Image (cartoon, helix red, strand yellow):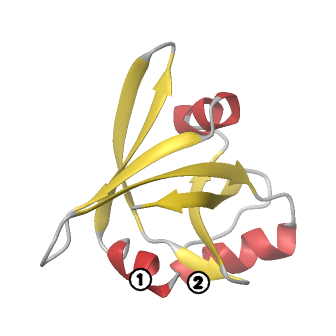
Amino acid sequence: MEEFVKDLSGVWYLATAEDGQPHVRPFDKAAEVGGKLYIGTTNTKKVYEQIKKNPKIEIYAPTDFVPCRFIAEAFIEENVDVAEEAFEKMGKAYDPETSIALRLENIKK
């Protein structure tokens, strides 16, 4: 997991799909909590709704040496303590009303 957190330490790009149309947007930061990889968003963004409908995502991270590209599934973390810890490790403020921690599973490079 440490390798993925390192790959996602700068600006990277997350792709989702909605109605057959891909959507790509920049993200930054990821965190490991309990051996799982997390990214964060808010429930006010389209990416949240897209992932709720279709958890399959693709990530592209331009690293210094070799660009990293992988696929995964993103699931909403229901455990508030874990979500809050993930945001804290990402160095981001956690708002219990809007913050959403997404747990990445089935990660394949």
Q: Disc 1 versus disc 2: distance between alpha carbons?
A: 16 Å
- Mark 1 crowd level (few <14, some 14–19, many ≥20, 10 Å Cα): few
Residue 38 in picture, x, y percent from top left: 60, 67
- Residue depicted at x 55% and y 73%: 92
The image quadrant of residue 93 is bottom right
Using the image, determine if residue 80 lies above or below residue 42.
below
Using the image, determine if residue 58 lies above or below residue 64.
above
Residue 10 in picture, x, y percent from top left: 30, 72
Give the amino acid at mark 2: Lys
The image quadrant of residue 44 is top right
> Which residue is identified by label 2?
89
Residue 95 in picture, x, y percent from top left: 72, 62
- Residue depicted at x 62% and y 50%: 74
Residue 94 in picture, x, y percent from top left: 68, 68
> Which residue is identified by label 1?
3
- Mark 2 crowd level (few <14, some 14–19, many ≥20, 10 Å Cα): some
Contact flag, marks 1 and 2 (Cβ < 8 Å): no
Left of 89 or right of it: where is 66? left
Left of 14 or right of it: where is 103? right
Give the amino acid at mark 1: Glu
The circle drawn on residue 36 is none
- Residue depicted at x 38% and y 26%: 22
Relative depth, front residue between 95 and 61 = 61
- Residue depicted at x 67% and y 28%: 53
Q: Nearer the viewer, mark 1 or mark 2?
A: 1
Element under disc 2: helix
